[in-house]
Image (spheres, rainbow, N blue to C red):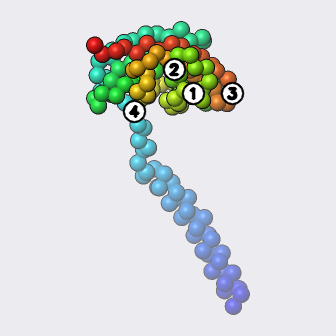
């Protein structure tokens, strides 16, 4: 009885050794490619920008554009002209006179590789302020610049 079970076990494993790699290869070849989400187009995300300027952030020029989305919300578009190498970057908007990031608004993360769009807080249209890039990994302020938000007259 044990000899019969051992033969069955040997036969089962012999078949699996041949069949499993074939099934794995077929599954890998037959799978659909992963879709890569394209970043949203700037021209479709916002109405014509109200203002545009290139920042003077140390080390990396970043094109800053402010505009409105179709719903009329104030949007900020950051387009790195060169790769930003600092890790774990966070983008903040702070009102003028504020120096602590806790008194500002976290807009989101910034990977420094591709253009990204953020929604600005309502306070940005009412009072002057600036942008801050903070590296969470290093725990320091990487760059800062004033942000000129145009007023609709």
Tell me which numbered mark, 3 or 4, is placed earlier along the sequence. 4
CA separation in Å, label 1 and label 3: 17 Å
User: Foreground: 62 or 68?
Assistant: 68
Tell me which numbered mark, 4 or 2, is placed earlier along the sequence. 4
Taking the spot 60% from the left edge, 26% from the top edge, the residue there is: 101
Whole-percent x, y for residue 114 in the image: 47, 25
Instruction: Determine which residue is flagged by label 4.
Output: 38
Taking the spot 40% from the left edge, 15% from the top edge, the residue there is: 149
Q: Secondary structure at mark 4?
A: loop
Q: Secondary structure at mark 3?
A: loop
Instruction: Determine which residue is flagged by label 1.
Output: 103
Instruction: Determine which residue is flagged by label 2.
Output: 95
Q: Are marks 1 and 3 in contact (CB under 8 Å)?
A: no
- Judge depth for marks 4 and 2 and give the one in front: 2
Taking the spot 46% from the left edge, 15% from the top edge, the residue there is: 128
- Judge depth for marks 2 and 3 and give the one in front: 2
Whole-percent x, y for residue 99 in the image: 61, 20
Q: Are marks 1 and 2 in contact (CB under 8 Å)?
A: yes
- Residue 32 vs 90, above or below: the answer is below
> How many other residues sit within 10 Å of disc 3, few (<14), some (14-19) or many (≥20)?
few
- Judge depth for marks 1 and 4 and give the one in front: 1
Tag shown at residue 139: 3
């Amino acid at each position: 009885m044990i000899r019969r079970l051992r033969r069955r076990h040997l036969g089962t494993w012999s078949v699996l050794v041949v069949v499993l790699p074939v099934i794995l290869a077929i599954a890998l070849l037959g799978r659909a490619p992963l879709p890569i989400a394209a970043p949203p187009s700037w021209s479709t995300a916002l109405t014509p920008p109200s203002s545009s300027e290139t920042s003077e952030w140390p080390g990396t020029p970043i094109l800053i554009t402010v505009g409105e989305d179709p719903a009329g919300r104030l949007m900020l578009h950051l387009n790195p002209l060169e790769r930003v190498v600092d890790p774990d970057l966070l983008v903040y908007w702070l009102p003028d006179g504020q120096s602590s990031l806790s008194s500002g608004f976290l807009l989101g993360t910034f990977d420094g590789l591709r253009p990204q769009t953020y929604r600005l807080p309502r306070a940005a249209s009412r009072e002057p302020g600036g942008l801050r890039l903070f590296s969470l990994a290093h725990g320091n302020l990487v760059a800062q610049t004033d942000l000129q938000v145009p007023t609709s007259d």
